Image (cartoon, rainbow, N blue to C red):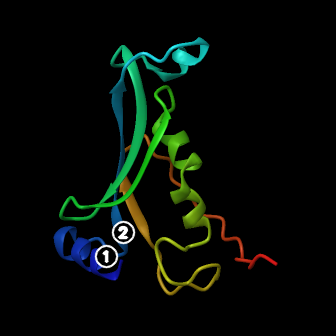
Amino acid sequence: MQMVKDEFKRWCELPYVQGTINGTHIAITKPIGAFATYYYYFKTRDYNIVAQIIVDCNQKFINLYVGLLGLINDSHVIKKSTLYKCMQYRSLLDNYKGTLNAPSPHYLIGDKGYPLISWIMIPFKEEG
């Protein structure tokens, strides 16, 4: 992740950027049954699942979360993703899992569909 941060700093002069985030809708055939409406995406007028993608400066995928219902927007997708849980524990963006004293901030750049989130730092506890 340090190489990704360094590359973003060289590319756009923004420090601590870990990637860019965005969502996309993937068309599917209409599901059978009562739950089909949950997959309906009004903007494209078809049935979809949602993918949330994070890429680095070279457009290389560094995180992918896919499969949620098509009617869910970006601000809800991130909160349901494993990315959100990992960032709460800082296990994805740095090696300071569960600590409150990480040496630097980390950012993802996204469009207005993503909320500004102040990560709640929960101390990591081992099971058992």
Quarter where residue 28 is shown: top left
Q: Secondary structure at mark 1?
A: helix
Q: Do residues under tags 2 and 1 come within 8 Å of each other at their CB atoms? A: yes
Q: Earlier in the sequence, mark 2 or mark 1?
A: 1
Res. 124 image quadrant: bottom right
Image: 80 above or below 57: above
- Which residue is at 26% across, 80% downward? 6
Badge 1: how crowded within 10 Å, few (<14), some, or many (20+)? Answer: many
Vertical side of 78 occupied by 29: above or below: above
In the image, 92 versus 57, the foreground residue is: 92
Crowding at dot 2, Cα within 10 Å, few <14 / some 14-19 / many 20+, comes out as many
Q: Position of residue 121 (x, y in %)?
A: 66, 71
Left or right of 94 on screen, residue 12: left
Give the residue drawn at x 54%, y 51%.
81
For the residue pair 65 and 10, the one nearer the viewer reads as: 65
Residue that lies at the very extreme toward the front in this rendered image? 32
Mark 2: which amino acid?
Gln
Count how many numbered circles sit on residues in the image.
2
Percent position of residue 19, x then y = 33, 63
**Residue drawn where x is 60% and y is 12% of the image:** 34
Determine the CA span between mark 2 and mark 1. 5 Å
Which mark, residue 109?
none
What residue is pinned by disc 2?
18
Quadrant the C terminus occupies: bottom right
Specify the farthest residue to the right. 128
Mark 2, secondary structure of its residue? strand
For the residue marked with disc 1, what is the amino acid?
A: Lys
Q: Which residue is mark 1?
A: 5
| Left or right placement of residue 81 versus residue 112 in this view | right
